[in-house]
Amino acid sequence: MRDSDRKFYRAKIVDDYVRGRLDRRSFLKAASALGLGAGLFGTGMARPRLSFAASGTPTLEPSADVLAWVKEVSKPFAGTTLRLATESTPPSNAINSQLKKYFEEASGMTVEIEVLPLEQVLQKLTLDIASQLGTYDLYYIDQSWAASVSRDVFDPREQMAEKPDLAMPDYNMDDFLPALVDGIAKYEDRWVGVPYDIPIFIMQYRKDIYDKMGFKAPETLEEYYEQAKAITEEMGPNMFGSTGQMKSGHYSLECDWTAWLWGHGGSIFTPDRKFSGNDEAGLAAMEYWDRLKTTMPPGVTGWTWDGQGQSVAQGVAATMMSWGEFFPYFDDPNATKVSGLMEAARCPKPKALRTVSETGFGEIPGVGHQGGSSLAVSRNSKAPDAAWIFMQWATCYDTQVLITALGGGTGPTRESVYDDERIIANRRVGAGTTRHLDVVRETIAKDMGSEPDLPQWAELSNDTIPVRLGKYFAGEYSSAKEAMDDIAQATDKIVSAG
């Protein structure tokens, strides 16, 4: 199949899926065949709605020097309209609702940002790439799409080198956290944009309950279980020691599984690219998960991350290992029952940890499961230079500081932002807090886990694995080994067919 035909076919299957003309399982199979990751499609993910509140911080206004650069470099592009389709993320929401007005005033450009469900973002992106119409100037790229679109976007290092007259002073590409560049923004020898957003697992717990029980943040997974068990026994059925995102057939269930698998020294694949979740370490992880599930609320097998987060927010569960962007939401006194009661910590240490050389398909074991994204300029853009100016502004140090201080949410993708005085000043209880971000930074550097990069991963992570895990927790297998052997057989068949 010619590359252009492949792009049109890819766009068609995404469009058919979004419009309801293609069922989810057929879409996942087709997406896998085209090398298109689809980690969150059809999952109905709703990120925590963060308040843009930053009382107690120094004045939150863009740098005059940055805006002066925008004004000067944008003179040839005044009147240009730039368009971006993006998922609802803390950076996109802060830029769209709070910050783009400063860029538009300084540049004389107009920026139209469409905030859409992730599958619709991909629909817009694939149609734009196939048609080469350049409807969108910038692309929001989920990490699972990087391989598929890597040749349809500019490598920002090339833009920096080839257009020095458009380069922002002190933009500093080296400031992006190296683990995020490697795990999110790179495919083979190319940068597919720059790191833009980084949801990642951290531990979040009720300090008041831990103090009452005489506990400190657990250092090991076994200690995490023992504490959760003790809380459930002491305070149940009104309060449970832990919680999860274990809905059958849902990507969230696969996310939980990877944390326990990696944390017990296991991996999804071996170096010879065979499924390894049914080996000794994988079965130890399942045994642990079975025990931990007894400390969770009964409804956990019907919850994605939304239900998991609400079980903590409404005072039903005392701890969770999940997405760090929930933490600023928990601190909002107008939204939850736990404002000021939560603390953040690194995930408990893994019992063992495999190296990348001991896995397959570039899998990076780590208890801190991540799901980041990049921002890039489209090669089909009619105004790529203007888009590059906006992209630099949107991802520069100053703008990241404002995004983080105004909205909290996931951690910055730049190292220097974590130490900015405005971010430090926002380490107080309340909506949009940043008091969890040191934990996020340390997790990115030391605990980050990344799923394997293979064409069939969309189907495996959204269907093959979580469907069978859901059947296991529903009692449809006689043992964890039977379930994992079934997953192994199905996974290896799908991978070999590709």
Image: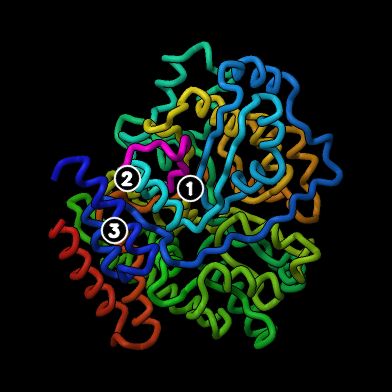
Residue 85 against residue 422 in the figure, above or below: below
Q: Percent from the top left, x then y, of residue 465?
A: 32, 69
Q: Secondary structure at mark 3?
A: helix
Q: Is residue 36 left or right of residue 227?
A: left
Q: Amino acid at mark 1?
A: Gly
Q: Is residue 319 left or right of residue 444?
A: right
Confirm or deny contact between disc 1 and disc 3 (CB under 8 A): no
Q: Is residue 360 visible?
A: no
Would you call the spot at circle 2 few (<14 residues within 10 Å), some (14-19), or many (20 or more)?
some
Report helix, strand or loop for mark 2.
Answer: helix
Residue 13 - label: 3
In the rendered image, residue 485, in percent from the top left (x then y), is placed at 22, 73
Give the CA distance from mark 1 to mark 3: 24 Å
* Residue 226 falls in image quadrant: bottom right
Specify few, some or many for label 1: CA neighbours under 10 Å numbering under 14, 14-19, or 20 or more. Answer: many
Extreme right residue here? 56
